[in-house]
């Protein structure tokens, strides 16, 4: 695997202490044939990566002689993933070649299509709330009813995320992607039949389907990144996939106030404007569903990394979804991350849902500017997402 450019060819003097999780390895060692030999051997001081504890590796490091290279953190992780019990052979062991890995050009198509239909789903989430006063007047319902068109996304996510992730783990990426894109498309078309003042329940039905679709969408970025992209691309690919959802929220803040201005004194014109927004969304969602069916594949012909090759070669019966969930909730750092991210996300969703009402309470008739304020919130997050993804790919400083 590749290392950060700044570390290419870096050497350490004999006896140099380990630093930043790097293991010194002789430069002339062949891949997969690194072993621990006596000081007077032909390849003195080289390390056995498979099956040697880290503390033993540290003890041996002082005895190394000759030029050495540094093993990057992702390569060290791969070594641990591929390690086996003593006496067992591993991929790349003596006489056994490493699995073939390659990066597929299709990965960019998969990432683009996913990002776009994630964008459309996020757009449909916020398209009602940012002009809640307009839809309140059109359907003749309370603001709480309009707020539920946004909150149904969060309500659906809580009970459905576990079966959705189980489906992703057991049935794979393609089926999950088709469900997300297909339900998103179906929900958009149902909304097209709700452009009458007494059909609020129809628009709620369409929004419910879109909320179910987002459960099959939000869990995919990390999976797409790990299955399709190389070690130095994973963080950037994941950030890009998440970026599509953020961009959809940004467009959802910006376009609805422009496409559907507050013309409640002219109900026919208002219905016409709403139908333009709904039919436009449906057309884009349909195109993206067709592209998903054509271009989305389960995985590339060859794994993008040795770590991914090891995961793909593992036996399915060794995996337990329930056990993985239990292990996650026993992991204190994961629980802390879950709580902190939940607080941050909950605050953002709350502000987004109520932004129109907060602004119009003090500044009447400023629907367009309320959308611009929401756009500013999201754009700031998008810039941070890109920069953090690039930074993580380069430094690996996740903590």
Image (spheres, rainbow, N blue to C red):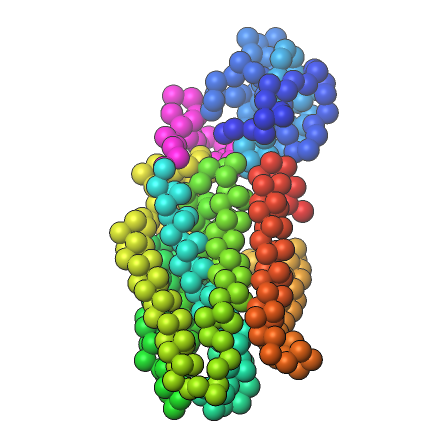
Residue 66 in percent (x, y) is at 63, 11
Residue 44 in percent (x, y) is at 60, 12
Is residue 80 part of the magenta span, yes or no? yes
Which residue occupies 65% across, 64% down? 344
Residue 140 seen: yes
Which residue occupies 32% across, 55% down? 292
Which residue occupies 46% across, 30% down? 87
Is residue 263 part of the magenta span, yes or no? no
Which residue occupies 73% across, 25% down? 17
Residue 163 seen: no
Residue 245 in percent (x, y) is at 49, 59
Residue 299 in percent (x, y) is at 35, 45
- The quarter holding residue 183 reads bottom left
**Which region of the structure is painted magenta?**
78-104
* Vertical relation: 86 (above or below) 38: below
> Is 72 in front, or is 184?
184
* Vertical relation: 368 (above or below) 299: below
């Amino acid at each position: 695997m590749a290392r950060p450019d700044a570390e290419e060819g870096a050497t350490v003097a004999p006896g140099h202490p380990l630093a930043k999780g790097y293991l010194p390895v002789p430069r002339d060692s062949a891949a997969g044939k690194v072993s621990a030999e006596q000081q007077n051997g032909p390849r003195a001081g080289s390390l056995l990566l498979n099956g040697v504890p880290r503390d033993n590796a540290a003890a041996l490091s002082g005895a190394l002689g000759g030029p050495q290279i540094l093993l990057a953190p992702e390569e060290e992780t791969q070594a641990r993933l591929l390690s086996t019990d003593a006496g067992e052979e591993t991929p790349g062991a003596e006489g056994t070649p490493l699995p073939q890995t390659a990066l597929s050009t299709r990965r960019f198509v998969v990432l683009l299509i996913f990002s776009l239909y994630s964008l459309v789903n996020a757009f449909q989430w916020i398209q009602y709330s940012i002009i809640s006063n307009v839809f309140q007047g059109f359907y003749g319902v309370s603001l709480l009813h309009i707020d539920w068109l946004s909150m149904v996304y969060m309500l659906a996510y809580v009970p459905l995320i576990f079966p959705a992730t189980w489906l992703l783990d057991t049935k794979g990426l393609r089926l999950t992607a088709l469900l997300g894109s297909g339900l998103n498309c179906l929900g958009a078309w149902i909304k097209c039949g709700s452009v009458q003042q007494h059909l609020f329940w129809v628009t709620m039905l369409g929004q419910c389907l879109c909320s179910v679709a987002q459960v099959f969408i939000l869990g995919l970025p990390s999976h797409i990144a790990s299955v399709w992209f190389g070690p130095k691309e994973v963080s950037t690919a994941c950030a890009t996939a998440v970026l599509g959802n953020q961009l959809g929220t940004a467009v959802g803040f910006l376009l609805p106030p422009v496409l559907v201005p507050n013309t409640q004194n002219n109900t026919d014109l208002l219905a016409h404007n709403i139908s333009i927004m709904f039919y436009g969304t449906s057309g884009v969602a349909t195109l993206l569903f067709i592209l998903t069916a054509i271009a989305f594949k389960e995985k590339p012909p060859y794994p993008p990394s040795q770590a991914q090759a090891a995961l793909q070669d593992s036996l399915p019966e060794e995996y337990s979804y329930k056990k993985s969930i239990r292990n996650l909730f026993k992991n204190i750092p994961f629980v802390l991350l879950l709580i902190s991210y939940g607080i941050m996300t909950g605050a953002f969703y709350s502000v987004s849902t109520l932004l129109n009402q907060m602004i119009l309470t003090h500044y009447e008739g400023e629907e367009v500017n309320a959308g611009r304020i929401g756009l500013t919130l999201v754009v700031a997050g998008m810039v941070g997402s890109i920069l953090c993804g690039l930074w993580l790919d380069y430094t690996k400083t996740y903590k």
